[in-house]
Amino acid sequence: MNFWRKYHSDIDSNDPRYNQLTLIYAIALLMVFYFGAIGLLNITLFDAAYVAVYDFIGFVIATSIFLYVYRGGNLAVAGWALVLTLITILLAFIDLSEAENYSLVWVTILPPISFFLLGSRAATILTGLVFIYCGWYLYQLLQIGVPGHLGLGALFNFAEVGLAHILLFRFYERSRQRAYDKLRKLSITDRLTGVYNRLHLDNNLKQMVALAHRTQQPVSVLLLDVDHFKNINDSHGHLMGDAVLVHLASLLKNLSRNTDLLGRWGGEEFLLLCPNTEASAALYLAQRIIKALQKEHTYRGANQQQVTVAVTASIGVATYHPQQPFVVPAAISEQAATSSIPTDNYTVVTPEVAVAISEKLLYIADKHLYQAKEAGRNRAIG
């Protein structure tokens, strides 16, 4: 429903009001259609002009609410107006039909709409009162012995209410899925750079190791650290440091493949996971990143000031190949990290082995990164 963007340009899909606004539009349009169609049916098919009057009143009110919101009206006011209009028309319809032909079933569409638009507390009170009234009304009819009659109207009531429920809960499910997807994205994304966070990288590295073992294909990791990043923050401010990290994340995304996984490992460190990548290819990619980053770039710092800063980085590269014994190189081995993880012919790696291989892979990459720093920075070692 992008047609409403003209008067609600400040509300995007990340705004909490987005779902409320789209629901108000959807319900208003649904009410316009239902009241108009049912009014025509009551005139042409059921010869119930007195009932059609209420339908057309609802049609006019729903149209007015739609136009009110479309022109930028208050969403809370529109929500209450829709719910109260719906209650009024429903109760009038039930009273006029004396609860015949399952007319009371229309009340069941009230709770989902009320809860969506008014919130839990107001909707609970309002729908509770309506249901109490309907129960009392039905009791009065039973006391005076009003007979129930079923006809074509019962079939239409059942079909119309069923369709309304399908549309309402379809909207609810889509809204719930959007909210879930947004929450999931936030839980795995670094807020500053927009790349994945450390937790997501950890989980995916274990999966990549298991997949590499199953397919007998190598997996490589690149651990990157910005050189002298503290000096950038101290000299140009933290906003400039943030701009450098955002630029670096963008550069890494452009240089990596679609199958690679990029994330912020912590502070000024980034980790790039490269499935189906030999050690030589991973080192070549690291060198490309080093060269691309060496080019000076203009960043926007405090007070929107444009500053040209030369940024370099050091990269440590490590590769795991299922067909080769996985041993930490002697030059960087320490304590338990020197243990070998033998390969075998099995197609499945246990979660424990995947964790061990992942940790050792990161250990080697980190040590290679340290060697790159010791060797003068601005280089890749693998």
Image (cartoon, grey):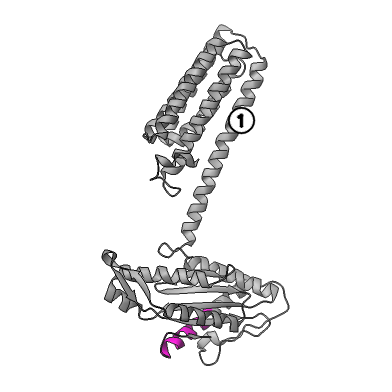
Residue 342 falls in image quadrant:
bottom right
Residue 163 falls in image quadrant:
top right
Q: From the viewer's perspective, is residue 276 above or below residue 64?
A: below
Q: Which residue is rendered at x = 39% and y = 72% of the image?
A: 267
Residue farthest to the right, as pictured:
345
Does the magenta-highlighted stretch encompass residue 147?
A: no
Q: Which residue is rendered at x = 35% and y = 81% of the image?
A: 228
Residue 363 visible in the shown view: no
Depth order, front residue of 345/232: 232
Depth order, front residue of 109/235: 235
Count neighbours of disc 1 (C-alpha within 10 A) and say few if under 14, some if 14 to 19, many if 20 or more: few
Q: Measuring from the top left, give residue 203's x and y in whole percent.
A: 55, 67
Q: How many marks?
A: 1
Q: Measuring from the top left, give residue 23's x and y in whole percent.
A: 48, 37
Residue 193 falls in image quadrant:
bottom left
Q: From the viewer's perspective, is residue 291 above or below residue 174?
A: below
Residue farthest to the bottom, as pictured:
331
Q: Measuring from the top left, give residue 367's x and y in whole percent.
A: 48, 85
Depth order, front residue of 122/151: 151
Residue 115 visible in the shown view: yes
Q: Which residue is rendered at x = 51% and y = 82% of the image?
A: 287
Q: Which residue is rendered at x = 53% and y = 10% of the image?
A: 50
Does the magenta-highlighted stretch encompass residue 366?
A: yes
Determine which residue is flagged by label 1.
163
Magenta extent:
362-378
Give, as a three-letter code, the residue at label 1.
Leu
Identify the element where label 1 is drawn: helix
Q: Measuring from the top left, give residue 269's x and y in whole percent.
A: 43, 75
The dominant secondary structure in magenta is: helix
